[in-house]
Amino acid sequence: MINSRTVLFALLAPCLALAGCNLLGSSDAAGKSGEAQKPAGLGVYSSLPLLWGESDDIRGFLSDGQEQGWAHAFIQAQDGLVPLDHLADASGVLPLAKDHVLLLAQPRPLTPQENVALDDWVNAGGRVLLFADPMLTAHSIFALGDARRPQDIAMLSPILGRWGLQLEFDESQQPGERLVDIKEGAVPVNLPGRFRIRPEDGSCTLEAAGFLAECRVGKGRVIALADAALFDDSHDPRDAQRRRKLLETLLARVSVGIGRE
């Protein structure tokens, strides 16, 4: 049965395109929960080729010899890895334990049922590391309009609006990779967005001029970054190692106090 919250998400989706409201929490508040705890596992839901590589035929898609980037190797090495192809099962529940972290990296638009399931999961204590890119610059072998192509523009306004965030994009900025400083270090970005929050809602704090938002949602926590260029492949081993370390430390940050709130 579709409940009233599902209907609400469905009604709000058209009018919330790239807009939203506000969330809860700060890194300082998060730190009060204790030291970072290693999550039991990592759920991954992404349109990026993090779990499987890109190929235009099934033979290449399944080939063990296919060259993969640093992010693919990092994800595959995680303990308790749970690949997700949906965020709501037949009963409308997100199929991931609360002691896992959910990595949402440029996901495809969520259905109303998935929005509700994700919101419920986080409110009950789930942790989310979200990369929402308003203008994805990663190379893809698939043409625009191909369903296999990564999501070019983040379309997450219903859930961001539910949590109190608004994703914005400055169309006047010039393309090209640059670095944005956050607490964990310098993050490579390319045509990034920025988050805004309602000033009257103290549920969220911003870093780096809105590039990163850390938010409290019920008993859970969300850390959102307005770009996904961190996952781009790097032919420089030292740069790839820096990217891997940044992702690792961001996952540790969102895991602080996991299972104890």
Image: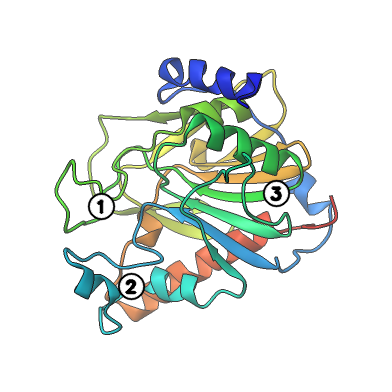
Please report whichever mark, 3 or 2, sits nearer to the chain's N-terminal start. 2
Q: Amino acid at mark 1?
A: Arg
| 104 left or right of 256 in image | left
Mark 2 and mark 1: Cα distance apart in space: 18 Å
Q: Amino acid at mark 3?
A: Gly
| 71 left or right of 235 in image | right
CB atoms of marks 3 and 2 within 8 Å: no
Q: Amino acid at mark 2?
A: Gly
| 182 left or right of 190 in image | right
SS for tag 1? loop
Residue 148, which numbered label? 1
Q: Which residue is mark 2?
A: 69
- Find residue 106 and report its horizontal and vertical position in percent: 41, 47
For label 2, count other residues whose C-alpha is less than 10 Å away and answer few (under 14), some (14-19) or many (20+).
some
Q: Considering the image in quadrants, where does the N terminus appear? A: top right
Eye-nearest disc, 3 or 2: 3
Please say if 138 is above or below 57.
Answer: above
Residue ID at (42%, 53%): 46
| 205 left or right of 142 in image | right
Q: Which residue is mark 3?
A: 126
Please report whichever mark, 3 or 1, sits nearer to the chain's N-terminal start. 3
